[in-house]
Image (tube, rainbow, N blue to C red):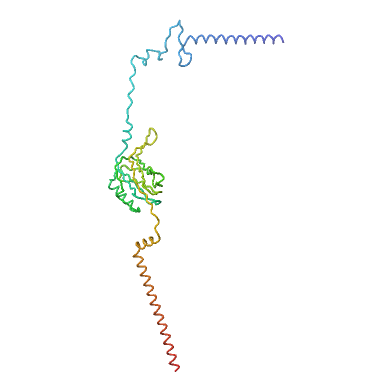
Amino acid sequence: MKGIKKILIGLSLVMVGFIVIGYFFISSIDTEETSDEGYYELPGTVKSAPDDEEYYPVPGSTDDVSSPDNTDTPPPPPPPPQIVDRQEAVESFLKKGNMGYYVPDSMEVEVPSTVSLIISKNKTLAQIEESLQTTIENEPRPDTSRITLEGISISKQMMATLYAMDTSAFSITPLSRVQQSVLLNDTAETKWEWSVKPLKAGSHKLIIRASARIYDGEASDWIDIEAYNGVVPVKAIYIPEPAWYENLFAFWKENWQLLLATFAAIGGFITWTRSTLMTWIRSAFSKKKKGETTVKQITH
């Protein structure tokens, strides 16, 4: 039995040896055939042909001169790029409109005043002036000569700002949004207002600015085109507190008719009361005197 086992083991080893030798032999044959058939080392990389063989390019490749894509006729040149004037493209969105604003000539220190600005596409300058006159009726010292009217370029979106040349001279509070829509096919108006409070007396300057805004889709940003930029001189005055007698005189001057009527009513009431009281006293005294006379007559 031991001899048979040894024989079987030997045969197995011999068979394994033959299998390994056959595998390497077949692999070497495949490698030689592959190296003779093509000229590509890596995908997309052409290997040069051996010196003793004639090279035939792959049909349809860039080396194949018979391919229709590799003719002697050069391809047509690309069309020239379209030149667009950016400034003209932006200005094509602008329309003609009108603007008017009101800034008081003088303002009292520490007392707020209102500055108004109106922009419209189709309202005339006269109509805008009328609107501003209505707006400033409730101002402390309205002055229609301070209304400024101007024709400007506008767009669907407008931005208006008011600021002081000397930032320490005023406290400015916007009463409306900085950017607002302007209707281009209507007679509506768009209004901006600011509350302006002078902080110190003197001659100062306010700057009022209006800009047309156009959205640039290519840059995803707004383009601001200045439509108006004006400097307005303003006087800030300090009015001291009046004395008590000045307040009394001012009160009398404003309400003298009411005061006279009140005094007359009070005087009439006092006169009526005094007359009524005296009549009652005399009546009572007369009754008492008659009673005493009657008693004396009965006694005698």
In the picture, which quadrant includes the N terminus?
top right
Question: Which of 53/91 is in front?
Answer: 91
The image shows residue 152 at horizontal and vertical percentages of: 30, 41
Task: Tell me the quarter of the image containing the C terminus.
Answer: bottom left
Q: Residue furthest bottom?
A: 300
Viewer-closest of 200 and 136? 200
The answer to whether residue 146 is left or right of residue 274 is left
Up/down of 52 relative to 287, above or below? above
Q: 55 or 134: nearer the eye? A: 134
**At which x and y percent is residue 265?**
36, 70
Labels in figure, total:
0
Camera-side residue of 215 and 19: 215
The residue sitting at the top extreme is 52
Percent across and percent down for residue 289 are 42, 86
Looking at the image, which residue sits at the far right?
2
- Indicate the position of residue 2 as horizontal and vertical percent values: 72, 10
